[in-house]
Image: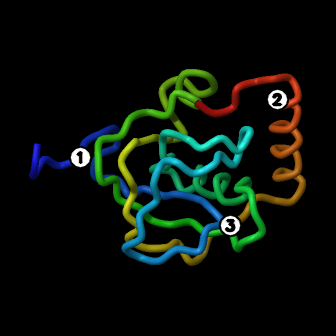
Amino acid sequence: MAGTVPTGPDAGATFYHGTRADLAVGDLLAAGRASNYADRTPLSWIYFSAALESAVWGCELAAGEGRERIYIVEPTGDWFDDPNLTDKKFPGNPTRSYRSRAPLRIVGEVESWTPHAPDVLAAMKANLERLKAEGAEIID
């Protein structure tokens, strides 16, 4: 219905998306890109969070060689809890992680944030590799 405002959990919050893509305010992040965490199959959802910490993980774990970036985004359609985290790892969604089939509009960039310590990041990457080797489905 034209003119309806997109809705979802944490409506009104500031939302973030961590990546290595070099984008600009006004650009759209959309589903259909390869996953950073699985077999690089195009995803039917775009993922984001209302927690800066989750976006830090997103950009640090993103594939590619580009600079780590955290964009401030605005959903253009309805969004939902991310079941990859909320149902499987963190019931109640304390990571404030969401997904949408509609694009996210970039409205800004977080210029300064604290990265994880190298040993913490290495441990997370090793854990993801272990899960992948065990055949775990990391992302839906």
Mark sitting earlier along the chain (2/3)? 3
Give the residue type that dot 3 points to: Thr
The vertical placement of 73 against 41, above or below, is below
Task: Tell which of 57 and 77 is nearer to you.
Answer: 77
Work out how far the residue at label 2 is from the one at label 3, CA to CA, in angstroms. 26 Å
Residue plotted at (17% across, 49% down): 5
Q: Position of residue 19 (x, y in %)?
A: 62, 61
Local packing at callout 1 (Cα closer than 10 Å; few below 14, some 14-19, many 20+) is: few
The vertical placement of 1 against 115, above or below, is above
Q: Are marks 2 and 3 in contact (CB under 8 Å)?
A: no
Q: Position of residue 31 (x, y in %)?
A: 48, 48
Task: Kindly identify which numbered label has been placed on residue 114.
Answer: 3
Mark sitting earlier along the chain (3/1)? 1
Residue plotted at (88% across, 29% down): 133
Dot 1 corresponds to which residue? 6
Where the N terminus falls, by quadrant? top left
Disc 2 secondary structure class: helix
Q: Position of residue 110 (x, y in %)?
A: 52, 72
Mark sitting earlier along the chain (2/1)? 1
Task: Judge from the rendering whether residue 71 lies leftward or rightward of residue 136; answer left or right.
Answer: left
Task: Judge from the rendering whether residue 67 lies leftward or rightward of residue 119; answer left or right.
Answer: left
Dot 2 corresponds to which residue? 131
Residue plotted at (30% across, 39% down): 8
Residue plotted at (63% across, 48% down): 34
Where the C terminus falls, by quadrant? top right
Local packing at callout 2 (Cα closer than 10 Å; few below 14, some 14-19, many 20+) is: few
Task: Tell which of 116 and 22 is nearer to you.
Answer: 22
